[in-house]
């Protein structure tokens, strides 16, 4: 398939990475954007020049309406945004972005959460399943957002319909037997911040191949897929 070609064609390289609003990726679909603010790349990247993680993030490929957010000089993608049904998703290649204070990472995560949030949550606490990290939470609270955060470890018994945003590993959702429900919730208007170290999941034997990763099965219709590549920061520790 075309996705398979994209996944196998991505190589590990090491030039400096930069944040880029890749307008050539196309705008989000009008149907999916109806409940949320427009201009995903501009909104998520406002005030952001570089992001950091304590580990080696997986890289992504993006096509169709998906928008790369953090892009290396050689085209490797470290973060991407898209829509799925009436929902929105931002994919990151490592959970270490959450809670990291390097560069503009707290602002980036806070912007991502604000973009994922439905307008209906503007006048009430934002209900989040999963921890955005205290640095990003502080940015949101300083902007006047009240947060109700439920740890991701509650995923197995959580009522997804009671949350605006989920911040979690799709592989963990698969392990909890909730991947199909997560897919329905997202398509019905949920906001997902997917954090997945794809190469790590494969090393641990949690998927037989990159094509069978829960994140790739979940996000293929959104135009986002994780690769087997692992990246290292080379621009002052930033991507």
Image (cartoon, grey):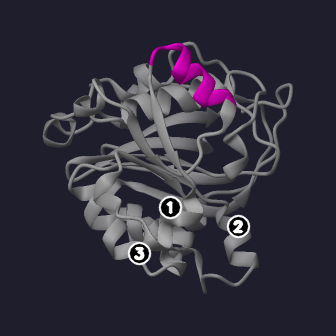
In the depicted structure, whether residue 200 falls above or below residue 49: below
- The residue identified by callout 3 is 178
In the depicted structure, whether residue 193 falls above or below residue 35: below
> Can you give x and y, in whole percent of width and height, for residue 174 in the image?
49, 77
- The foreground one among 69 and 191 is 191
Nearer to us of marks 2 and 3 is: 3
Left or right? Give the position of 225 relative to 34. Answer: right
Give the structural element (helix, strand or loop) at label 3.
Answer: loop
Q: Which mark is residue 205?
A: none
- The residue identified by callout 1 is 6
Please tell me which residue is depicted at 74% across the width and 79% down the height of the picture.
Answer: 204
Please tell me which residue is depicted at 61% across the width and 29% down the height of the picture.
Answer: 136
What crowding class fits label 1: few (fewer than 14 Cα within 10 Å), some (14-19), or many (20 or more)?
some
Left or right? Give the position of 82 relative to 54. Answer: left
Residue 140 is a magenta residue: yes
What crowding class fits label 2: few (fewer than 14 Cα within 10 Å), some (14-19), or many (20 or more)?
many
Q: Which mark is residue 199?
A: 2
Q: How far apart in space, not on screen, are marks 2 and 3 (Cα)?
A: 22 Å
Give the structural element (helix, strand or loop) at label 1.
Answer: helix
State yes or no: discs 2 and 3 in contact (Cβ < 8 Å): no
Please tell me which residue is depicted at 47% across the width and 67% down the height of the picture.
Answer: 216
Q: How many marks?
A: 3
Decide which of tag 1 and tag 3 comes sooner along the chain: 1
> Can you give x and y, in whole percent of width and height, for residue 93 in the image?
63, 52
């Amino acid at each position: 398939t075309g996705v398979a070609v994209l996944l196998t064609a991505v190589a590990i390289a090491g030039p400096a990475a930069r944040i880029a609003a890749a307008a050539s990726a196309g705008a989000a679909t009008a149907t999916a954007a109806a409940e949320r603010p427009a201009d995903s790349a501009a909104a998520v990247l406002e005030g952001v020049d570089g992001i950091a993680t304590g580990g080696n993030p997986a890289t992504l490929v993006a096509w169709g309406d998906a928008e790369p957010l953090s892009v290396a000089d050689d085209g490797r993608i470290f973060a991407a945004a898209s829509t799925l049904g009436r929902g929105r998703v931002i994919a990151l290649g490592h959970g270490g972005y959450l809670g990291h204070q390097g560069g503009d990472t707290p602002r980036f995560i806070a912007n991502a959460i604000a973009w994922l949030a439905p307008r209906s949550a503007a006048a009430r606490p934002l209900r989040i399943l999963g921890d955005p990290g205290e640095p990003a939470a502080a940015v949101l609270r300083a902007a006047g957002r009240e947060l109700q955060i439920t740890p991701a470890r509650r995923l197995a018994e959580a009522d997804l319909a009671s949350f605006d945003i989920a911040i979690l590993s799709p592989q963990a959702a698969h392990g909890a037997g909730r991947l199909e429900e997560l897919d329905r919730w997202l398509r019905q208007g949920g906001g997902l911040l997917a954090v997945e170290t794809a190469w790590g999941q494969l090393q641990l034997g949690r998927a037989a191949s990159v094509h069978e990763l829960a994140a790739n099965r979940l996000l293929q219709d959104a135009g986002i897929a994780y690769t087997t590549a692992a990246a290292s920061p080379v621009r002052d520790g930033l991507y």
